[in-house]
Amino acid sequence: MHLPSLGSLAAFSVLVSGVIARATVPTDYTKLAARNVSSTQTINGQYPLKHKDKDKHKPGCKSEPDYPPLSCNQFWLQNIDHQGYAPYAPWSSVPPTPPNPATYQVWRNVLDFGAVNDGSVDASVAINEAINAVNLAVRTGGTCAPGVCTGSTASPAVVYFPPGRYRIDNPIIQNYYVQLIGNPCDRPVIFAPNTYTAAFMLDSNPYGFQPDGAQSWGSTNVFWRQLANFVFDARAVPANRAEPLRAIHWPSSQATSISNVEILLSTAADTDQRGLFIENGSGGFVGDLVVNGGLYGLEVGNQQYTFRGISIFNAKTAVKQGFNWGWTYMGIKIVNCGVGFDFTAVAGDTNDLLVGSAVIIDSEIINTPIGIVYGDPVINIPPTANTFSFERIALQNVPRAIVGPGLTGPTVLAGTPTNTFIETWGRGNAYVGEDVGVNGPIQFQGAFLPVERPKALTIENGDYYTASKPYYENTPLDEIYTARQFNAVGDNTVDDTDALNNLFAAAAKDKKLVYINAGMYRVTRTVRIPPGSRIFGDPSFPQIISSGPFFQNERRPRPVVQVGWPGSKGRIEWSNTIIGTRGPQAGAILLQYHLNSPVADSSKHDKRDQAGEQGGLHSCEPSGMWDVHVRIGGFIGSDLQLAQCPKTPGNVINQFNLDRDCVAAFLSWHITESAGGLYQENNWVWVADHDVEQGVNNQQITIYAGRGLLVESSDGPNWLVASSVEHHQRYEYQFWDTKNIFAGQIQTETAYYQLNPDARLPQVAQEKWHDPRFNRGESGWALRVVDSKDIVIYGAGLYSFFINYDNSCAAPTASQKCQQMIFSVEGDSEIRVFNLNTVGVTWMLTVNGVDGGLYTQNMNRFAQTIAQFSYDEA
């Protein structure tokens, strides 16, 4: 990317004061409507049953070998021998009661529990028994249920739905650490009859089980949860009830996802139904979701979220945004709705605008009178609420593109036929170059200079590349190797290093799909994943756990999992796995990624780089990692819980009394200099701030890990979609001498224990690891960018909530903030950031040592917000 020179601040002010939008349709968009709404399989001729255009691939590539198509009932995950193991199950087996994993069933098929899939009778009782069970004989007390369990990783469960129609007379309750998975080839249909009276069809966090009536689990602590491959049909339910029907209730946080789901709502004129409802949490990712009908397709609020590949048809309002700090919408398609995006929500007590900021990119709105409506500036207190960054939104039959304030406000940007494509439009505060410490922000509303997108990050039409998690529907059973077949045990006791290395080596050589059975795989040396690997972890998130002296020397750090080797080329695909540590592991690099996947340049038509083809996967497509997470401490079996690592805010911690047994990692995630071509989606890198397990009620703990995510890929490209990194010592994200990075939404939290000790402890700075150095009384960086080019960030939430576990510093009115500086750009760098949100920080920007972006200049309702920051050293 080359960032056009913005010149003087005055010139920038002149640019954004106008309204600039192209009046002609780019060639790439002339067929958008037909491409995205045509299908041979429709409902009432209105819209496609399946979202066919969900992936934005590089040209001429494919990720699965050429297997003949299989019937949907031959889906491998439905038929494979499930030998999953949960060594600490069930969750109720807390000391002194020992676990009884031999009786615990991780995989549950709802038909085995008596669910009928022909739609003739209620299936909700059987489904909920499958969710709650220890096994077929004991159908309660198995998983972490509302009102009796505050959270636990001891009882992972996958509840599987074969194809069919499932009538529910009561809601499905998704317990903690339970994954609901349907058949991706023929998605099961969950439908409610006309007698249905409950508020939700799927309730992932029920109210009413706590003494105060609150949600069963604090929404900011709901982690590691999936809902995939379903259709929810509410059309038989009366369109307008005293309590509106909301199909899916999903207050959630990091490492959660909804994917390949469709919601069918009433299209009656008086419909009050809503599709996806999220009222709070700290997410998260939703992708490949289709909603048809309803008052609101999406009724959503959360601290931050990433929504990718969402299609909404025939809703009165497609997206009703509730409270947020930041939100990234990418690849959104809105067709035949009354309003596309409504950002006007206000607080009932203060009348403040609730929507902090939103990014919308690579999207389209069709046959919709009003595209986007924003809130009333009269009540726009604090001043940066409703900060927006819009880029590349195609319009077809949308007379009023942007309206505000409110639905009755004037047309701010005309739609069709005047403008058929919004290249850019935004509003909020902007900072340019090194002047951050000299002048205040530029306040703007209107068009802004577009990013010259790096071709390495885009597809042929200019949109950013994206890809969905593969399920390998056409892979035969005899083309799969499993961890159990290679004698991996997964009990967190036996050393599974050799078994896993043999599995991955054999599968890559023989071009087989790897299935990692449920379990906790203890390893005492590095596990190596060769080029050409395709790895599908059980949806329960099998864990690879490092242990022992091999990983304990911070002067000689070693990878727990290594992908490729320096200079290697090829591709991998990997999903549904957690990498963790057990006990002190000061030298552990949890994931080290060396592989280079040479990708096809979107400006050329050379479809394949033969030199980079290894292991049978075409390397013109980037590698992909979906729902692969790092989890350090705070979970059962880690030996890094409340009993071992309690917080000690009352003690002054120094190098002599710091508990070295709680130093659990050197570096969490490392993309090396030779690596490139890696698409990462919904990856959470978490150093535990609290103990998740039942019985300790999420009490805070102190775990130390030196560094978060280090990217030093010399050329890239790398994508970070719905990425979070939290609670490391020196930094969360560091981009060092790299280029071609797409990121959004990214989110961080500073370690809660800092400044006791500060960022100088426990691990000392090492120059060869490009470590930042700190003075006394400084906290770690959330984001550090050094000598890096072509960096584009669409949504960043950088939060500092505590000083030594005291959160009073995070309040917007606090005189002492939790942290002075949080985001540093250094050296010969080139970066563009849209919608930067911080909490608990004095200076939002630091450029070559100059602090700027004073928080009082950028106040939002709780966070502080900058619409745009750009820096080009050249």
Image (cartoon, grey):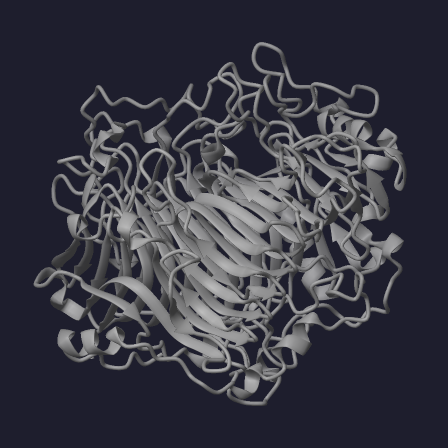
Percent position (x, y) of residue 331? 54, 66
Q: Residue at x 83, y 25 (%)?
A: 136
View extreme (front): residue: 408
Is residue 97 at all visible to an observer of this figure? yes
Q: Quadrant of the C terminus?
A: bottom left
Taking the view exactly as shown, the residue that stands out farthest to the left is 438
Residue occupying the far top of the picture? 96
Name the residue at 83% across, 33% down: 123
Q: Residue 665 is drawn in which quadrant?
A: top left
Q: Nearer the viewer, residue 158 or 369?
A: 369
Residue 625: percent from the left, percent from the top? 56, 58
Image spot of residue 198 (x, y percent) = 69, 30
Q: Nearer the viewer, residue 556 or 284?
A: 284
- Picture quadrant of residue 770: bottom left
Q: Is residue 820 left or right of residue 227?
A: left
Closest to the observer: 797 or 341?
341
Residue 127 location (% of width, % of height): 78, 32
Is residue 171 toward the left or the right of residue 664 in the image?
right
> Which image quarter is the N terminus in?
bottom left
Res 555 visible: no
Q: Is residue 70 above or below residue 497?
A: below
Could you tell me which residue is drawn at 59 percent across and 68 percent down?
Answer: 571
